[in-house]
Protein backbone atom coordinates (compact mmCIF):
# COMPACT_ATOMS: atom_id res chain seq x y z
CA UNK A 1 0.00 0.00 0.00
CA UNK A 2 2.84 2.42 0.83
CA UNK A 3 4.46 1.82 -2.55
CA UNK A 4 1.18 2.50 -4.31
CA UNK A 5 0.75 5.80 -2.46
CA UNK A 6 4.37 6.78 -3.15
CA UNK A 7 4.13 5.94 -6.84
CA UNK A 8 0.81 7.74 -7.14
CA UNK A 9 2.31 10.84 -5.52
CA UNK A 10 5.39 10.79 -7.78
CA UNK A 11 3.29 10.37 -10.93
CA UNK A 12 0.91 13.08 -9.79
CA UNK A 13 3.81 15.41 -9.00
CA UNK A 14 5.44 15.02 -12.41
CA UNK A 15 2.34 14.75 -14.59
CA UNK A 16 2.72 18.34 -15.89
CA UNK A 17 6.17 17.48 -17.29
CA UNK A 18 4.66 14.78 -19.48
CA UNK A 19 1.62 16.54 -20.88
CA UNK A 20 1.10 15.93 -24.58
CA UNK A 21 1.06 19.59 -25.58
CA UNK A 22 2.65 21.90 -23.01
CA UNK A 23 1.20 25.39 -22.98
CA UNK A 24 4.12 27.69 -22.19
CA UNK A 25 3.72 31.42 -22.41
CA UNK A 26 6.42 33.63 -23.88
CA UNK A 27 7.19 35.04 -20.44
CA UNK A 28 7.68 31.57 -18.99
CA UNK A 29 10.10 30.65 -21.76
CA UNK A 30 12.17 33.75 -21.04
CA UNK A 31 12.61 32.61 -17.43
CA UNK A 32 14.15 29.28 -18.44
CA UNK A 33 17.83 28.99 -17.57
CA UNK A 34 20.54 26.46 -18.35
CA UNK A 35 21.47 26.02 -14.69
CA UNK A 36 19.06 23.17 -13.99
CA UNK A 37 15.71 22.62 -12.34
CA UNK A 38 15.37 22.74 -8.56
CA UNK A 39 12.37 21.05 -6.96
CA UNK A 40 11.94 22.10 -3.34
CA UNK A 41 9.92 20.18 -0.80
CA UNK A 42 9.33 20.45 2.93
CA UNK A 43 8.55 17.20 4.70
CA UNK A 44 9.36 15.24 7.84
CA UNK A 45 12.85 13.78 7.58
CA UNK A 46 13.23 13.31 11.35
CA UNK A 47 10.81 12.47 14.13
CA UNK A 48 7.85 10.13 14.33
CA UNK A 49 6.75 10.67 10.71
CA UNK A 50 10.19 10.49 9.12
CA UNK A 51 9.29 7.30 7.24
CA UNK A 52 6.89 9.37 5.11
CA UNK A 53 9.41 12.02 4.17
CA UNK A 54 12.30 9.65 3.62
CA UNK A 55 10.18 7.47 1.33
CA UNK A 56 9.08 10.44 -0.74
CA UNK A 57 12.59 11.86 -1.06
CA UNK A 58 13.98 8.44 -1.98
CA UNK A 59 11.32 8.03 -4.67
CA UNK A 60 11.84 11.54 -6.03
CA UNK A 61 15.62 11.13 -6.21
CA UNK A 62 15.29 7.75 -7.93
CA UNK A 63 13.03 9.26 -10.57
CA UNK A 64 15.25 12.33 -10.98
CA UNK A 65 18.28 10.07 -11.51
CA UNK A 66 16.34 8.22 -14.20
CA UNK A 67 15.31 11.44 -15.97
CA UNK A 68 18.79 12.97 -15.61
CA UNK A 69 20.43 9.84 -17.04
CA UNK A 70 18.34 10.37 -20.17
CA UNK A 71 19.44 13.98 -20.57
CA UNK A 72 17.13 15.72 -18.11
CA UNK A 73 14.27 17.96 -19.19
CA UNK A 74 15.27 19.89 -22.30
CA UNK A 75 18.89 19.33 -21.32
CA UNK A 76 18.49 20.57 -17.75
CA UNK A 77 19.22 18.31 -14.80
CA UNK A 78 16.65 18.05 -11.99
CA UNK A 79 17.73 18.35 -8.37
CA UNK A 80 15.64 17.80 -5.25
CA UNK A 81 16.11 20.23 -2.36
CA UNK A 82 14.44 18.76 0.74
CA UNK A 83 13.93 20.65 3.98
CA UNK A 84 13.07 18.87 7.23
CA UNK A 85 9.95 20.17 8.96
CA UNK A 86 9.72 17.39 11.59
CA UNK A 87 5.96 17.24 10.84
CA UNK A 88 5.65 20.67 12.47
CA UNK A 89 3.38 23.13 10.59
CA UNK A 90 5.15 26.38 11.66
CA UNK A 91 8.51 24.92 10.60
CA UNK A 92 6.98 23.80 7.31
CA UNK A 93 5.75 27.34 6.67
CA UNK A 94 9.21 28.79 7.27
CA UNK A 95 10.74 26.16 4.95
CA UNK A 96 8.29 27.03 2.19
CA UNK A 97 9.02 30.74 2.62
CA UNK A 98 12.74 29.97 2.36
CA UNK A 99 12.13 28.15 -0.93
CA UNK A 100 10.05 30.97 -2.40
Image: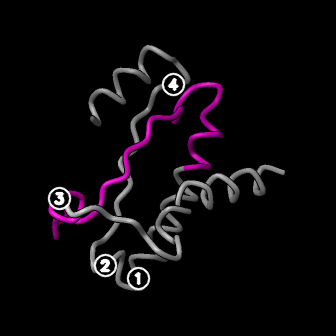
Indicate which disc, 2 or 4, sits on the residue closer to the N terminus.
2
Label ID, residue 74: 2
Q: CA distance from mark 3 to mark 1?
A: 24 Å
Confirm or deny contact between disc 3 and disc 1 (CB under 8 A): no
Q: Residue at x 28, y 80 (%)?
A: 75
User: Quick one: SS at disc 3?
Assistant: loop
Position of residue 18 measured from the top left corner of the image (x, y, whole percent): 52, 72
What residue sits right under mark 4 in the picture? 86
Indicate which disc, 4 or 3, sits on the residue closer to the N terminus.
3
Q: Residues within 10 Å of mark 3 (few under 14, many from 20)?
A: few
User: Quick one: SS at disc 4?
Assistant: loop
Q: Residue at x 40, y 21 (%)?
A: 93
Image quadrant assignment for residue 79: bottom left
Is residue 41 inside the magenta stretch?
A: yes
What residue sits right under mark 1 in the picture? 69
User: Quick one: SS at disc 2?
Assistant: loop
User: Quick one: SS at disc 1?
Assistant: helix
Q: Nearer the viewer, residue 4 or 25?
A: 25
Magenta-tinted stretch: 27-56
Q: CA distance from mark 1 to mark 2?
A: 12 Å
Q: CA distance from mark 3 to mark 2?
A: 14 Å
Amino acid sequence: MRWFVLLFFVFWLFQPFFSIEPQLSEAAEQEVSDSGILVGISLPLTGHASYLGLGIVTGMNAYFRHVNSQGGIHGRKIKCVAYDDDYNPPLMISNVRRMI
